[in-house]
Image (cartoon, coloured by chain):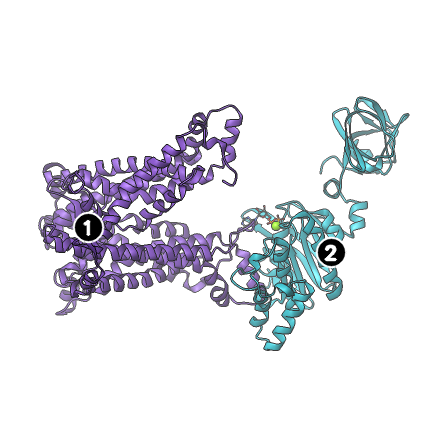
Chain colours: A cyan, B purple
Amino acid sequence: MAYIELSGVTKRFGKVAAVNRLDLSIEQGECVAMLGPSGCGKTTTLRMVAGFEDLDDGEIRVGDRVISSKKKHFYLPPENRNFGMVFQAFAVWPHMSVFENVAFPLRIRKLPREEIQARAEEALKHTNLWSVAEGSPDDLSGGGKQRVALARALAIRPDVMLLDEPLSSLDPHFREEMRFEIKDLQRRFHHSILYVTHDQSEAMALSDRILVMKGGVVQQVGSPLEIYGAPANRFVFEFIGLSSFLQVALRDGRMEVAGASYAPPAPPPPELAAAGGAWLAARPNEIAFSTEGGVSGTVERKAYLGEVIDYRVRVGEAEVRVQKTRREPGPEVGETCGLIFARPRWYPLEG
Amino acid sequence: MTTAVPAAQPRFGTAQILLALSVAILVIVVAVPVLLIFFNAFWVQGQFNVVDVIKVLSQHETYQALLNSLILASGVTVTGTIVGTFFAWLVTRTDLPFKGTMKVLFLVPFMLPSFIGALAWKMLLSPRSGYINRLFMDLLGLDGPVFDIYTYGGIILVETMYLFPFVFIQVAGALERMDPTLEESARISGADLFTITRKITIPLVMPSILSGSLLIMLYSMAHFGTVAVLGIEVGIYNIPTLIYEKIHQSAGSFASIRTGTVLASVLVVTAAFIMWLQNKVLARGKYQIIAGKSFRPSELKLRGLRVPMLLFCIAYIGFTIVLPTVTIFMVGGLRTYGLPFTAENMTLDNYKFILFDWQLTRDAIWNSVSLGFSAALITMTAGVIISYVIVKMKVRGKGILEFLGMLPFSVPGSVIALGVILAWSGKFGVNIYNTVWIILVAYIARYMAFSLKANSAALEQVHDSLVEAARASGATMWQALKDIVVPLVRPGMLAAFFLIFLPALRELTVSVLLYGPTTRTIGVAIYTLNEDGETVYSAALAGIALIIIVFGESVIKRLFKVGRKG
Ligand SMILES: Nc1ncnc2c1ncn2[C@@H]1O[C@H](COP(=O)(O)OP(=O)(O)O)[C@@H](O)[C@H]1O
Ligand SMILES: [Mg+2]
């Protein structure tokens, strides 16, 4: 059985559902990333798991305990959940030293002095903070502060770790470093982690599974590979990685784009064929140029981005983005070319 | 402000001229009076004399006044801090009903002049004739008052009612801006709300609490009105009231002026010390607790206490704001003071008389309005110039100006009044004593701090690059000033104007030391009428003052709301 289980979890602010009937289960030692644009309800979900928000519907369980339940009117207070949480804005206490920050939850638990000392030391050493333990967290960089928050959460040996965009307040180059550190710590301690982020590469790098959310509704749950390789809908496709879309009409086994008719690169699903139109989606590096055949377009812009060359190709009203490596041959600006969709995916027009 | 701004030196001289002008204004208006006070206190018969100062200080009367100032200020600071912090917490961190309205109401005492409040409380709680005391004596057959307002406790209570917003405003602001995840992370660490309040919340807002309490202390130390109304009668003097007594009773004799200057020196030094302490507290306690993106402070559920707490707040507001205000208007409408409030004893004639018929009160209203307006206009203008030099210009010798600019903040009203008496009574060839001009000069000095604060805050918002962009687009220095800087700082200037105009309308501390036969201000008229036993006229004028003040405040609120939208 899953270790953490959210079933039918719903939260409304006024009339709007910030989170709508969310189901999710997380195994012991698994890291699940919740991914979605700003305002989609990620923080709200995390706060419900932490116990800061009541539920408008549904239930949350950890192990065999119910911790939040609308029906039973039961909410275990956050302070009794034994969760570790890391916030986007660090939330380290500036009036305490780094050491005191980490020792605080242990003191609250009234552990013996030696144990507090030992556990805080351990957590600080794991996060490379031991040398600055006596200093003020205000003297640390963003990355340093976030490590304090991480050490503080680790020190209590939490049942579950909740992280709310822990890296998005950091400078880009710290981000990558911290990402590895978090992954490292997770491997070592085998926490169950719910990790909130709006950055798809962070989610890919860190998590065992990804939950993609939009407007409070789950769009897809799956491994990073599944999410990237087989996005469930147009939104997920667009949110994960670069994307190009073409709106096509489907008629009699052929597809029409900008007044021209082509053989589709792969047969579209029958229900879309029946609907008469679809989005043809592809990653820019999965589109090839050809001199004969393919969807015809005109190169409008060509930008050198170092190793890759970024093309914008106009096809009727639409603009298709194509990326090729520097070494591959390609058309020049103003030239017409054919576009071959190597790995086409089809999505319904509405949605 | 990190790079040199070529814009600031359009031509040789402009910067220097502005600097010199700024220094001159501050020297003449603030520095000279303060220096004259020190000079008179410490320089006796051609030599520096400390022994004499100590002798003055050890006279029973002066010593007692110093002690009283300390007792009263400490008492008010403690009670005001507790009350202010409690209400701030209540309106920001709990689910108290009508929190927003309550928050606005708790700021109302800031608007009300405390000496008018003191007057009301005297009418309600003076030992023999106070309405509440008489009511209880009749009702319960007591032969003594329930509460005697003419005591240390009474004065502290009344001052607390009007000064607690200093702490309230600072702490409520800090609690609102504070990142709620600081508390939430303590909660998830296992701490209950009580522990969080004790270990996280209070330590984090401590700088704001302390800074607010120091403001209360500073204000109470130098406060004239309440002590004058409630203390003098029973011989409780603090520093400002003793200065007033000395200057007034002995008609400017040398000995009394000296006592005054010694007391004023103590006041300046104390005030400067408190200011210094406050800056230190603020600088040291600049924790980075400002909220990031998260915007939801966790609210403590009061549950069963919700309604009782609301009732408590309403009772507090009713008792400290509504009751005194109603009392003022009711007494102002009595035919004779002391009559019961029955329909046949009430009349509007008092109001009509002081508004239209009585020269003394009509003069007072006119004086206050014209003085307030001119002082606000002049001080605002001077403040813009000085702030501009301090905040924006790179010019040698600015350090002096920065130092001088600090002065107005730590010079209490009675000190300024005494200083301008010393400076402008003919000693230096100008004698404007007993005219409105001396009051005007004193007002300018008194309110310079407000103007500097509002204007430099506005100017700091105007980033240098805005001016540089204008210059790069071809504007001259003056065009850039006119088209970019002035429109951007206009709200600051407007704020400065009203920050001066409104308090000046009800000013008492300064004008009570400077008024002459025809130069009473509203505050002075209310105060002296009360002293002379004209209680109903005093109350009626106080009522009119309250109307003007409330009207003025609401006009400003409107104005700024419109300004922000537009
Ligand atoms: N306390 C609140 N009151 C009203 N609306 C809220 C509150 N908290 C969140 N919301 C709304 O709920 C939605 C989801 O917010 P949030 O969970 O913070 O999104 P995310 O973390 O994914 O950016 C947003 O539209 C936000 O405006
Ligand atoms: Mg969020």
The answer to whether residue B303 is left or right of residue B246 is right
The one nearer the camera, B391 or B556, is B391
Q: State the image coordinates of residue B97 (x, y, percent, origin top left).
A: 41, 55
Q: Which residue is drawn at 75% across and 29% down?
A: A319
Q: State the image coordinates of residue A32 (x, y, percent, origin top left).
A: 72, 56
Q: Name the residue under label 2.
A: A180
Q: Which residue is drawn at 57% across and 61% down?
A: B185
| Residue type at numbered disc 1 | Ile
* Element class at badge 1: helix
- Say the numbered circle drawn on residue B328: 1
Q: Chain under label 2?
A: A
Q: Which residue lies furthest to the right in this view?
A: A292
Residue A173: tell me if it is visible: yes
* Element class at badge 2: helix
Q: State the image coordinates of residue B492 (x, y, percent, origin top left).
A: 39, 38
Q: Residues within 10 Å of mark 2 (few under 14, many from 20)?
A: few
Q: In this view, does B403 lie above or below A286?
A: below
Q: Residue at x 15, y 45 (%)?
A: B525
The one nearer the camera, B78 or A252, is B78
